[in-house]
Amino acid sequence: MKTFFALLLFTSIAFSQNEDLETFSWNANKPLVWKDFKGIPNQNTDAAALTASGITFGFSIGKTGDRITDFTTTVECLFYPSESWYKPEDASPHILKHEQLHFDITELHARKFREQISRIKASSSLRNQLNDLYKSISLASSKMQNLYDEETNHSINREKQTAWNILIAQELKKLEAFKTQ
């Protein structure tokens, strides 16, 4: 007899984990536009905008007796409009592209997560493997987001911005098979 257990782990982003937050999934054919940013701008920062995105992850485990026999997962790359904001007086196509790349970096890590999950075999350590992998991917995503802002000086260094645009496009292409559907 096979039984299923489900667990949903919610996103690595640092703000409140309210299930009622409006979200939408990353989509190569739907780049961000300023009206997607519905949050209240933080006037106490020099930042022109903030993109709130994250990876949600859930899984179901199939068991026969006490033995884990199979599993399924869901991994989503989401944008949080009410937590994302911009200052209209600072808005420009260049800054919007910088913010889009933050969302693209989140998608890149969702793809890396899916790719690594595809290599995992059902076993008694499955829950720990998946949770450890999620933590690792979340940390890697956060580090890359910070490095991106540091190297581009939050989009001010246009040469570095261009280099990051190219790098992330190449990395996304390599993992095309694992894109958000």
Image (spheres, helix red, strand yellow):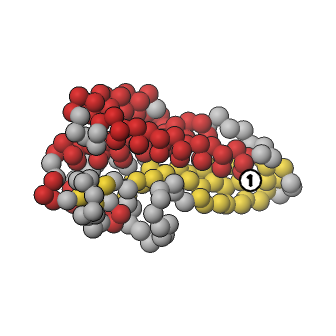
Residue drawn at x 83%, y 53% as measured from the top left:
64
Disc 1 target residue = 62
Task: Report helix, strand or loop for mark 1.
Answer: strand
Looking at the rendered structure, the kind of residue marked 1 is Gly
Q: How crowded is mark 1: few (under 14 residues within 10 Å), some or many (20 or more)?
A: some
Asked if residue 42 is positioned above or below residue 92 in the image, the reply reads: below
Asked if residue 8 is positioned above or below residue 160 in the image, the reply reads: below
- Kindly indicate the quadrant of the structure image that contains residue 42: bottom left
Does residue 70 appear in this view?
A: no
Question: Left of 88 or right of it: where is 174?
Answer: right
Give residue 82's position: percent from left, percent from top: 33, 66
Give residue 45's position: percent from left, percent from top: 28, 58
| Most foreground residue, 65 or 113 | 113
Residue drawn at x 52%, y 40% as measured from the top left:
140
Give residue 31's position: percent from left, percent from top: 27, 47
Q: How many labels does the image show?
A: 1
Give residue 48's position: percent from left, percent from top: 23, 53
Residue drawn at x 60%, y 36% as measured from the top left:
116
- Kindly indicate the quadrant of the structure image that contains residue 119: top right
| Most foreground residue, 178 or 104 | 104
Question: Left of 88 or right of it: where is 162?
Answer: right
Residue drawn at x 74%, y 53% as measured from the top left:
62
